[in-house]
Image: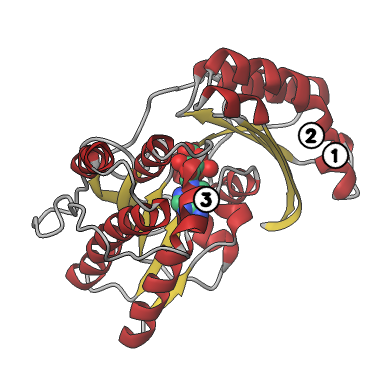
Amino acid sequence: MRILAIETSCDDTAASVLYNGTVLSNIISSQDIHTAWGGIVPELASREHVKAIGVIVAEALKQAGTDMNNIDAIAVTNGPGLPGSLLVGTQFAKGLAIRFNKPLYPVHHIEAHIYSGYLENPGLSFPSITLVVSGGHTGLFVVRSAVEFDMIGSTLDDAAGEAFDKIAKMLGLHYPGGPEIDKLARAGNADAMAFPRGLINHESFDFSFSGLKTSVKQYLQRHPHHRIEDVAASAQRAIVDVLVAKTLRAASAYNIGAVTIAGGVAANSELNKRMRQICETRNWMFVSPRNAYCTDNAAMIGYLAALRIGNNVQPTADFRINPTSIRKKSAH
Ligand code: KG4
Ligand code: ZN
């Protein structure tokens, strides 16, 4: 089965073609326009999607060596995300589905992140423990099958990526701040400041990053001559410590020896290194998707649609966007 997938939930316009779950093309256009504003401006994001979507979909088809007549199904992110951005992708997909008479599958953006470890390595077994850490979401999941997962923990305030972005902004760095902090931290001393590790000893699998944010802010006010590399390294260490501790504790508690990370923050080099090292010592499988499958992309949307189609999930005629939905329990 050949699937065309479209993703426009936030500030990346993305399209991908997959053949039986294998990625043939994965095209993405990121919107630089937001950098000057220090964060995403929703109205600008949807306008940029309108400009890019036709070109990006055409390029995905071209690189896959195919055209709409040879596509069997269309998958598109219908939420959560920015309503105006979601509308561009979903309406484009709906138009293609009507024009070419193809079935249309809505895909939940966070669920697609959850399964991106399986996109990277289809040999990854069920069940797995998956940490999803993006700009908008932070959650821990027990993934039981292609259609069944439980969210066992989530952030009580900021998402991990949001914490990276807000701290980066305080340091005068560009948006998105995560990659900038990652880079600077390599030249910094991670033990220079003891920033708080929210809820690290709490028995739940929930997260909290607002205390860290406040602590960094106060530190910067009190120490105008700080070394930016040290602040970046210490803040990153505080975030990574909590993410690693909770994920590995979940794997032990549920007796699951397969761990994956996903979402934009999963591209973080320290998070990857620490998770890999500890999983290796415990003889657990660890799958870290390549960066192109961690940050927002359409390949993960097409892959989850393919998994679900294989599990008899039906296309939809009554198609709606769902900007705010986060499922707390199983997918079905
Ligand atoms: O999944 P994603 O591309 O978009 C959302 O669905 O939110 O995640 C974007 C987030 C941003 O907050 C960005 O700063 C963060 O992922 N990020 C990183 C790194 N690369 C991206 N955070 C830490 N280290 C990185 N290397
Ligand atoms: Zn995302």
Estimate the spatial distance between the alpha carbons at disc 3 and disc 2, rounded to whole Å: 24 Å
At horizontal 45% and vertical 29% (from top left) the residue drawn is 80
Q: Earlier in the sequence, mark 3 or mark 2?
A: 2
Q: Quadrant of residue 28?
A: top right
Spatial CA distance of label 1 from label 2 is: 5 Å
Q: Which mark is residue 59?
A: 1
Q: Quadrant of residue 16?
A: top right
The residue nearer to you, when weighing 89 against 106, is 89
Circles 1, 2 touching at the beta carbon (< 8 Å)? yes
Report helix, strand or loop for mark 3.
helix
Q: Amino acid at mark 1?
A: Glu
Position above or below: 290 against 300: below
Q: Which three-letter amino acid code belongs to the residue tagged 3? A: Pro
Question: Callout 2: few (<14), some (14-19), or many (20+) C-alpha neighbours within 10 Å?
Answer: many
Find disc 3 in the rendering and name its residue: 179
Give the distance between the C-alpha atoms of the residues marked 3 and 1, in whole angstroms: 27 Å
Q: Kindly report which numbered mark, 3 or 1, lies closer to the viewer in this rendering.
A: 3
Q: Is mark 3 within 8 Å of ligand 1?
A: yes
Please tell me which of labels 3 and 1 falls first in the chain.
Answer: 1
Amino acid marked by disc 2: Ile
Viewer-proximal residue, 268 or 76?
268
Q: Are marks 3 and 1 in contact (CB under 8 Å)?
A: no
The residue identified by callout 2 is: 56
Relative horizontal placement of residue 95, taking residue 261 as reference (left or right): right
Tag of residue 89? none
Q: Quadrant of the C terminus?
A: top left
